[in-house]
Image (cartoon, helix red, strand yellow):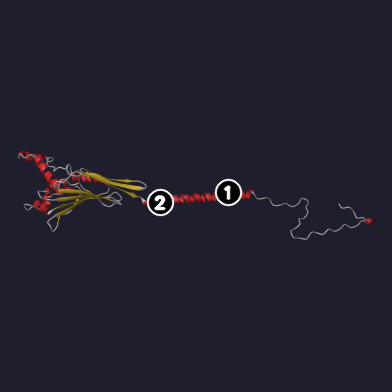
Amino acid sequence: MLAVVALALVLAGCKVDATVSVVVRADGSGVVRVTVVADAEAVKAAESGGVALEQAVRLADLADSGWTVGSWAKADDGSATIVLSYRFESVDQVAGIVAGLNGKTGPLPSLQATRDAGFFSTEYAVKGSIDIPGASAGIADDAELVTKLGALGVDVNIIDQQLLAQIQSSFTLKVVVKLPDQAAVTFAPKIGKEAGSVQDVAPIDASSSVRNTERILFLGAAAGFAVLAILVWRRGRRRRRRGSRGGRGRSPAPQGRSSGAPTQRRGAAPARRVPPRAGPGGQTPPRG
């Protein structure tokens, strides 16, 4: 479809710039947006013979396939801009969206997005290539058109090569990728020394990594509570051990004398001894 849009607008001395942007959000949803800018000469050429720009560049098939197709907005200098967008819920849809936009002969042969959600981080990536030299005008792929031109004695291959040369010299394409936690990155093919010639294929390789902060904080909090619980348990266990050891080491309370003699209290005066009385005859009886 990009090649068809360029073919409808690009004529000798005209210029068409297209930007394909892929915006991926944190949850994997996002939008593919295409902005096409045709200069004043391209607009005049498309509207030659009194044909409106909307009729010269028909995009109804894109609207039928789920694209939101805006209206052509003309600037004071005579140029015109149109924006097409397609929202997706998962990055797995990007490859199919771009393939439907590109067609079999367009300059975006492959473009896919991925999202790999891990426990500590989520990885995002968009990869593909811009291949304007490998694109085609698509005339040879239209069997009905080939038959009609062949009946008129027209060499389809020559016309296809001429149109493709015009596209490569007047049509520019860049891809802008915006991933979570990353600034937008622009990819575009290098321009050769010849006026407007594309030098080579431009690889598209953008990636970003987003930390799952909430999970990391939750894991840290859980680990902190686990360590605290272990410390409390160990401290309680030590206290119980100390208590059991103290109970076993105590000496038994002192017992009274077996003779039944009273125990003298501390601080009391010693008892006075009463001398035994003398027996008959004045003799003192022997001590017991």
Looking at the image, can residue 166 be seen?
yes
Front residue of this view, candidates 44 and 168: 168
Front residue of this view, candidates 4 and 279: 4
Mark 2, residue position: 218
Residue found at the far front of this picture: 193
Looking at the image, can residue 112 be seen?
no
Residue found at the far right of this picture: 281
Mark 1, residue position: 241
- Residue at 42 percent across and 51 percent down: it is 220
Residue found at the far left of this picture: 152
- Please, what is the three-letter code of the amino acid marked with disc 2? Phe
Label 1 with label 2: CB-CB less than 8 Å: no
Front residue of this view, candidates 135 and 268: 135
**Helix, strand or loop status at disc 1:** helix
Give x and y (percent) for residue 239. Answer: 56, 51
Front residue of this view, candidates 99 and 64: 99
- Please, what is the three-letter code of the amino acid marked with disc 1? Arg
Give x and y (percent) for residue 30. Answer: 26, 50
Give x and y (percent) for residue 155. Answer: 7, 39
Q: CA distance from mark 1 to mark 2?
A: 35 Å
The total of numbered circles placed on residues is: 2
**Helix, strand or loop status at disc 2:** helix
* Residue 102: assigned label: none
